Image (cartoon, rainbow, N blue to C red):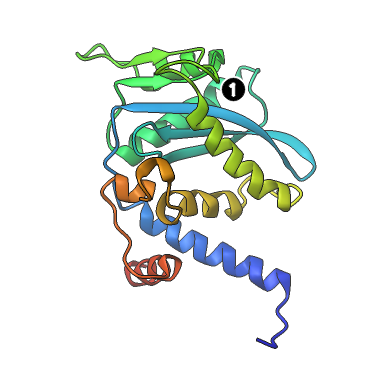
Amino acid sequence: QGINVSHVSIYKWIQKYIGLMENYLKQITPQLSNTWRADEMWLRIKGNPKYLYALMDDETRFWIAKEVAGDKFSKEATDYASNLFAQGKRIAGKIPLTLITDGLHAYHLAWKRELFTFRRPQAKHIEHATWRGKANDNRRMERLNGEIRDREKVMRGLKREDTPILTGYQIYHNYLRPHEALAGRTPAEASGIRIEGKNKWLTLIQNASRKG
């Protein structure tokens, strides 16, 4: 357009509008299935290796919650995983009947803390999900990890743990990106949430501005 804009200004716009949309979308409850998946991936933030914990609905591919953690092996890893599951409960308004994860012990401890109940039916934890297998294979989570990696790679790492870039990509994944496995629908549409208009980013920003 013949206009020079500082990259700092663009980043401030991202911060402003991602925060606006995030607060607006917190008020909407997705209709999720009773099976959730959790996984973690390492990424570089400010030059240091960190871990991104992600929680996803198995049926709709809705990326429910995320948590950036310092590691996955210390005692604090259970707290990170517990925060992830607590977010999931709050966002979905329920607990799942089945949780599928890899063999990271912190997930099992966090499941006991946040998702296990003595009520019937009881939540079940399936551990040791693998790349190949039947119902408990981990390819769906690995696909999400690949999407995040593609975004992070072109940015040559992220600058801060609370970066709006991750939240922005979570919004994009859930509300704008059509998924072949969902017959071209977005995870939000599969969860009963429809965003109208050709430019869904603009629709979200306008709706969030009105609610704000």
Is 201 on the left or on the right of 16, as rendered? left
Q: Tally the marks.
A: 1
Front one among 32 and 93: 32
Q: Residue at x 29, y 57 (%)?
A: 194
What residue is disc 1 on? 77
Quarter of the picture holding the C terminus:
bottom left
Quarter of the picture holding the N terminus:
bottom right
Q: Residue furthest bottom?
A: 2
Q: Residue at x 51, y 60 (%)?
A: 18
Q: Is residue 95 above or below residue 18?
A: above
Label 1 is placed on what type of residue?
Answer: Ala
Front one among 156 and 70: 156
Tell me the quarter of the picture where residue 87 sits.
Answer: top left
Image position, residue 142 (x, y; %): 56, 31
Q: Residue furthest right?
A: 47
Q: Is residue 149 above or below residue 212?
A: above
Image position, residue 150 (x, y; %): 65, 46
Q: Residue at x 62, y 51 (%)?
A: 163
Q: Is residue 189 above or below residue 101?
A: below
Q: Residue furthest left?
A: 120
Image position, residue 72 (x, y; %): 63, 22
Question: How many other residues sit within 10 Å of disc 1, few (<14), some (14-19) or many (≥20)?
Answer: many
Q: Residue at x 58, y 54 (%)?
A: 164
Front one among 100 and 86: 100
Give the SS element for disc 1: helix
Image position, residue 89 (x, y; %): 34, 33
Is 109 on the left or on the right of 45, as rendered? left
Is 138 on the left or on the right of 7, as rendered? left
